[in-house]
Every structure is written in C-alpha cells, then in structure tokens.
Image (cartoon, helix red, strand yellow):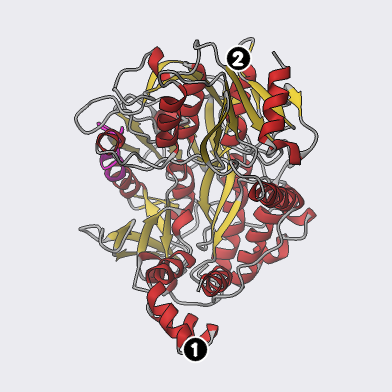
Amino acid sequence: MKRLLALLLALCLCCACALAEETAPAEADASMTLPSLWQDGQAHQIERKTYPMYAGSLENEMPEEMPLYFVDGVQDLPWMELNDLAGLMNFICSNRNNYQNYAITVIPDPEKRTVMFRRENDSVVLFDFEGGTITWGDYYAFRQGEGELYLNLLNNFPTQDSEGRPNLLSVTGSRERHSRVITLDLKGYGVPMLDRDGLYLVPMQTLATFFLAPDSLSLYFNQNCIILHSPQAMSDNFDLFATMMSMQDEIEEMAAKGLSQEEIMAMVAASVPKTIVSVYFDGPKGERSLALSDYGLHELCLELDSLYGLKDSHDIDSFMTYFADIGLLTDLMSADPAAADEAVRRLVKYWLDDGHSAYYSRSYLSEPGSEEAESGYSVASGKQLRESLWEIRGNRPGTEQGYSEIGDTAFITMDAFMYFAEDHYAADEAGKPSTDTFGMITKAHRQITREGSPIKNVVLDLSANTGGAAPAAVALVSWFLGDARLSLKDTFGGGESTAEFRADVNLDRVFDEQDTLAGRGLNLYCLISPVSFSCGNLVPWAFKADGRVKLLGSVSGGGSCTVWPMATAWGTSYAISGPTRLSFMKNGAYYDIDRGVEPDYVISSFERYYDREALIEFIHSLY
C-alpha cells in the first residue's frame, strides 16, 4: 500500500495542475525594448466590467463584484482603477494581524495628471500619469503595520494573543535605516498608464506585484473571475494531493480489486472537489493576445529588475538582455502561453538556481502538461547531498529529528523550522505540546535544564536544515543566546533594520533568563553543512557573529534573500529571491550571508557528522 501511494504521489506531482535622495529607476536595455502598444495621448476605447472576486477560498467571495477595465477590446489584459486598488488594500489590511488603522486616502489632481495615495502615517505614493512613473516616499513605511517592525523578519507573526498577552516572541529593541525614494519608470519599460474621463488606470499585474507581493499575495484573472490568493497555493497538484490523502482507504480497496494505477488516478482526479484553484484553471484556454504578450514581457522585466535580490550576484544588468543571452526571449514573446510558462519555469529553476526562486504553476490559459523541469546545478547538487546525508543518518540511531542524549551531550536535530498557528500555551497545559519548532525547543529546554541534568554540551544539528519559518529560527537563536539580534538589508530602496528578540521558551509569558541556555556554563555547538540553507544558514550566522556558539562541520549553503511569491501578467505562479536580504551586522555595517558561514572547527567527513560517539569525543577534546 505504501508503495502504491508513493507511485500515485509521484504521478500526482508530475501532473500539471501544476522624497530625499532618489533611487534611480531600473532601466531596460533600450536596444531590447519592444514598442509599447499604448502610447500616451492616443484615443482609446475603455470598457468597464465587473467580476466575482474570491479572497483565499470559494467560501470567501467578496460581497460586491470587483470592476476591471479593458482597453481597445483586449479581453485578457485587465486594468485596475486606483480607487479600487486602495479599497482592496484597506480591506486586506483591516482583516490581518498587526494591520490596525491602515487606511489609504486617494487624492487625485486632474490638472497635474497625478494621483496620491496617503496613509494615516503620512507615507505616500505618487502616480504620475504624464511622466509614466510610480514613486514611493518610503516603500516599506507605506506598507508597515501599526507596531510592526520596519523590515519585518517576522512578517505577520502575532507577538500577542487575542487577549493581548505575550505570545512566544517579544521585540525588545530595533534600529532602522529607512529606504530612499523609489521611482518606477513604467514608461521607460513600455508599461502603460492611462488617465481618461476621471479614471486612473494601471494594468492589474503591475499593481499586484508592487503592492501585494510583499505580503505573499497576488491577483489572478481568468476572464471569469478575480482571485486574491498566495501564488504558492495556486497549483492544482495541492488539490489532487489532498484528495488522494483523504482517499487512502478507497485507494487500497481499488488496488485490491486489481485496478491499474492509471485507473485509480483517474478516479481520484474525478473526486477532487471544486476549489478556488480549480475555478481558476476553468478559465478559457488559448493564445495570449499580442497586447498581453507585449505587456507581460515588459512587466516581467520591470518586476525582476526591481525586486530580484541577487541581480548583482548574477551579474544581470537588465533582465531583457539576460533573457536574450540565455535564449528565453523568443518564448517569453510568444503567443503560446505554455511556451511562456516554460520560459519562466526554466528561468527560475535552471538559470537563477538560487534555492529560493521557484516555479509553482502554469497560467490558466495553458493546457495541463508535464510540470517536470531540469534543476540548475546548485539546487540539484544540494538536493543530492541532502539525500546522501539522510541516507547516512538512516544507518545511525539517535540522529533522527528531535531531542536525544548521549552521556553529557544533548543533540537537537532539526531539518526545517516550523511554526504552527495554534495556542502553544493551552496545548502545553493540556499535555499535548505543539510538534513545531517552538514545541521542540520547549521540550528540549526542559530536558537540558531539569534538576540533576548531566548535560554539559548541547549540539544543534542543522546539517540537513533547508530553512522554513523565520519566527521559529528567531526563537531558536534566542534560546541559545538570550538576545537574538537579526538583520535585514533591502536592495530595492537601501533600507536596513536590526531587531532584537526574546523567546518565551518555558511558556510562562515572561521573557527572562529562564528562557535561554546562555549563562548556564554549557558548551554550545551547531553542526552545519552545505545543505544548511536560508534560515538554516541564518541561525549559524547569528551564532558566528555572537561567538558563544561554536560551529562544527563545513561551510553552510547560504541563501540570504527572503522569498517573494509572484505571478506573471498571464497568470503563471512563481517565486524569486526578494529584495530583503538576511544579513549580519559587524562594526555597524551590514553584510549579506548568501555565501554561507565558515565553521570554527572543520569536520571533513559527512560520516563523522552522525557518529555521535566520535563527535562527543571530538567535542571533549576542544575543552
């Protein structure tokens, strides 16, 4: 049965369902730029239509249909009016944690052909329809919630519960350098803006990218409805997989009756319920209009030139030129949506190859097809090494995830950082503590600090950790060090932020010395490898900067940028390494952590990583 489920899962995953100093605007290579299909001053036919809009699920349909606008008869390229964008953003922010009193006021000036968005904190955005630009006085202040950090590593993590009591993490201090003025030169990229008859119109995808993507949201239009959703969840593989998991008994019965894998898979697929994702893919199939192909390419260049956090590391001056250099430009210009989808997938998986950039799903215009694509050399080698480490660990008892003790040494093995949105305090009181990273930390802390504990050495094994939830990683650093100081640097506008955190490890809602391993006379270590990536790389960097936790193993895998889920203008879902980069601060300056951190003590053989007895002997030799 397990083999059958594994085969079905493999089949499932192969299915396509799948205002100070101003920052210079990113410039496209003029020699590679196509002529825009919309020129300022021309007469245009503008059509207004309304559509049902779903926010996150079919059960959450907006009470009123959302208006979109279409120019010169092009029906696959929606435009949005700025008043509607402001209303949508106010709605979103009023329904999320830490976004109270978020209100955007729209201030048009027809004579100057401008529209200003002003927030209650006086942050502004200026849309200049004559100049073809969008300018933020401070990009991150404009989207900052009340009481929220400026560059917020915790994203929307609730530091208080519904009753206002402390919840797991506390921010004890911060220092911030705010962003410079950011101007997007839409006209220079061939991305249109239209102001006509009191309407202020910008293509929906441009607005979604720069106003919603920082919150991991995008807007999707399939000519039938509008969907507000996270790009990570837009693959219909998720629906198929969830259905398959709920039908395990039925699948077993079908297999016992002799049905083939293809027949079983067809029956499972027929049982997939109607979801927001399936509704999206029910949109009409067909070619992209010339207007959508033109705008989609230019918009993609605009957003990647602006937001890809590793652009300098990849030696990319202009993504338009880069697309030509790597042979993707023709497909990105094609009327065939599947060819354009494939170009995006190859870009993020094979060429960017940075571990955070990812391909999620096709456009609604594309027919289902194979979602398999060649990975780049870096991602492929990292995956291969991680599987090798798992294989080695499989033959070594006591190396599985969780807490274990051997003599005077405690091992905490974590292959990922997880945070479950639940009441950790109530669960712990009920004797059913959370199984996420917070729960693991609490359990391990009690074992290590128990009365009569023999523990002298604590080894945190992150050798196969590829990252995960940043709040969980922050809690881990605080557990080891007491004060966790973590930094972010922004490549979009030049902002910087260092915040100091404390974790309530013992779940008493008090942030004090009882919550940390620091100051207890313990020898603290962290085991790392080239697989240690993203937050699995951030944690050892924090240890390295502090100096009290010694690093064992080999250079970690890097991964400095936070993930920004995105979408294309024709509806492809993907992610990039975003402009906010995990960093460490030394002598007041910020340095990114993308190349990994050197260990204090090199362990040359991966086999020795998991020979716990030999590792303990080595640790004893260090003091």
| Left or right of residue 303, residue 121 in this image | left
Position of residue 609 measured from the top left corner of the image (x, y, whole percent)? 70, 36
Say which amino acid is labelled 1: Leu
Q: CA distance from mark 2 to mark 1?
A: 60 Å
Residue for badge 2: 548
Residue at left offset 61%, top offset 57%: 297
Say if 534 sits above or below 370 in the image. Answer: above
Range of residues picked out in magenta = 91-102
For residue 14, which quarter of the picture?
A: bottom right
454 or 441, nearer to the observer? 454
5 or 49, nearer to the observer? 5
Q: Earlier in the sequence, mark 2 or mark 1?
A: 1
Say which amino acid is labelled 2: Arg
Circle 2 crowding by C-alpha within 10 Å: few under 14, some 14–19, many from 20: some
Q: Is residue 101 magenta?
A: yes
Position of residue 319 measured from the top left corner of the image (x, y, whole percent)? 69, 48
20 or 54, nearer to the observer? 54
